[in-house]
Amino acid sequence: NQGILANYLPNFIDLARFPYSRENIKPQSILWVRAFTEIYNPGLAINALYEVRRRYPDATLTMIGPDKGLLAESKKLINKLGLNSSVTITGPVPNELLYTYYQSHEVFINTTSYESFGVAVLEAAACGIPVVSSKVGEIPFLWVNEEDMLIVDSLDESKFANEILRLFANNNLANKISTNARKKAENYDIRLILGEWKKLFA
C-alpha cells in the first residue's frame, strides 16, 4: 500500500547437515530441542509425555538445550511425575550432531510461546521427523496443518499429547507429514537462498 517493492528472503538451513532418514527410529520417542526458559515451555513437553504414557507406557522424551533458568524446575516436575527413567536431558548438542537425534526419534514437539521463522522446526522437518507445533509466529503461514505438520492451536499438554498419539498410532499419517515436510524444507536450502541474495545484490 506504500508503494514499496519488497523481496522476501527467508532464513535457510544447510540441507547437507540435515539428511533425511526414517530408518533408525526408536519407537514411541519424543524429541524437544529448545532452551530451558519460559517462552519454550519445557514443562508442557514433560506433561505431554506424562499423558502419552497413559496409552504408551514405554514412551520417552529427550530434551536438548541449555539451561536458561528452568532446568531445575523441569527436573523437579520430572521427579514429581515419576518420569526420571523416561526423560533424558542432554544439555546443549553441537549443531552438526543434531541430525542424529532428529533421525532417531519418532516425533518432534515445538512447544514455544513465540516463534519467528522456526529454524529448529525446519531442521527437524528436513531430517524426516514429523513435527507437532504450537500455532505461533510464522508457523501457520509456512506450514500446513495435517499436510506437512500437525499444529496445535493452544499451549495445552492434552492437545499436544493427542497429536503425538495420532502419529504413534498412524504410520500413514506420520509418513505423509514426514515426506511433505522434507519437500518443503528443500525450498530453504542455503544454496537456493544465497542464490536469491546474489540476485538481489546484483
Image (cartoon, grey):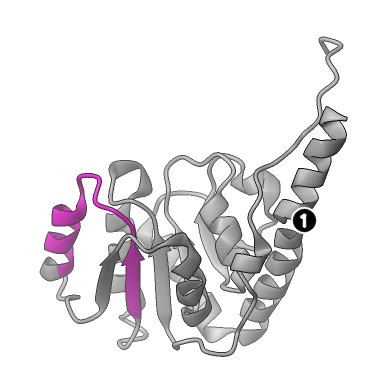
For label 1, count other residues whose C-alpha is less than 10 Å away and answer few (under 14), some (14-19) or many (20+): some
Is 64 part of what is drawn in magenta? Answer: yes
Q: Is residue 196 left or right of residue 87?
A: right
As rendered, which of 112 and 103 lies closer to the eye?
A: 103
Residue 79, by quadrant, is bottom left
As rendered, which of 72 and 149 lies closer to the eye?
A: 72
> Which amino acid type is marked by label 1?
Asn
Q: Position of residue 111 (x, y in %)?
A: 42, 54
Residue located at (55% from left, 57% from top): 121
Q: Position of residue 181 (x, y in %)?
A: 69, 65
Is 7 part of what is drawn in magenta? Answer: no
Quadrant placement of the N terminus: top right
Q: Examine the rendering and report whether any part of residue 27 can be seen.
A: yes
> In the displayed structure, would residue 141 be above or below residue 173?
above
> In the displayed structure, would residue 43 be above or below residue 102?
above
Q: Examine the rendering and report whether any part of residue 48 can be seen.
A: no
Residue located at (66% from left, 49% from top): 12
Q: Secondary structure at mark 1?
A: helix
As rendered, which of 49 and 32 lies closer to the eye?
A: 32
Name the residue tied to disc 1.
187
Q: Is residue 110 left or right of residue 143?
A: left
> In the displayed structure, would residue 3 be above or below residue 38?
above
Residue 117, by quadrant, is top right
Quadrant placement of the C terminus: top right
Please provide the residue range marked out in magenta.
60-78
Residue located at (28% from left, 68% from top): 90
Residue located at (44% from left, 87% from top): 26
As rendered, which of 89 and 17 lies closer to the eye?
A: 17
Q: Position of residue 187 (x, y in %)?
A: 77, 56
